[in-house]
Image: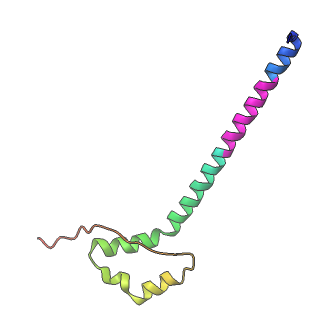
Amino acid sequence: MNLSIKNKLFLSHFFLIIFLLLGLSYKHYKNSIDSCVKNITTFHENSSASLVTYCSLAISGENYGNLQLPSFINELSSNKKLLYLKVIGKSDFSSRF
């Protein structure tokens, strides 16, 4: 198959443009997904900051009774989107003086 120079230039530029469009479309898709995940993560981190602070203070002072208070449990159960809460921590409280 003998192609003229005009046809070869057209095909090479056509494939270059298709390649660039596909590459830029993929990059835009990936950036938009990354941005969406970052925004959702930031929102949830900011909205749970008070809960994390409250639990952190209870764990660091070995005051686990605060986590079992009815007011705290009622506050947690009022949030219908909260499915479960798992609290794990290491206390920095020491009984040695």
Q: Is residue 89 left or right of residue 30?
A: left
Q: Nearer the viewer, residue 6 or 47?
A: 6
Relative height, residue 87 to residue 16 (above, below): below
Secondary structure character of the magenta stretch overall: helix
Residue 85 position, x and y percent, is: 44, 74
Quadrant into which the C terminus falls:
bottom left
Relative height, residue 18 to residue 71 (above, below): above
Residue extent of the magenta highlight: 14-29
Residue 15 position, x and y percent, is: 78, 25
Residue 51 position, x and y percent, is: 44, 73
Residue 26 is one of the magenta-drawn residues: yes
**Residue at horizontal 72%, vertical 40%?**
25
Q: Nearer the viewer, residue 81 or 1?
A: 1
Residue 67 position, x and y percent, is: 37, 81
Residue 92 is one of the magenta-drawn residues: no
Task: List the single residue furthest toward the front.
Answer: 1
Q: Nearer the viewer, residue 19 or 92?
A: 19
**Residue at horizontal 41%, vertical 89%?**
70
State the count of labels. 0
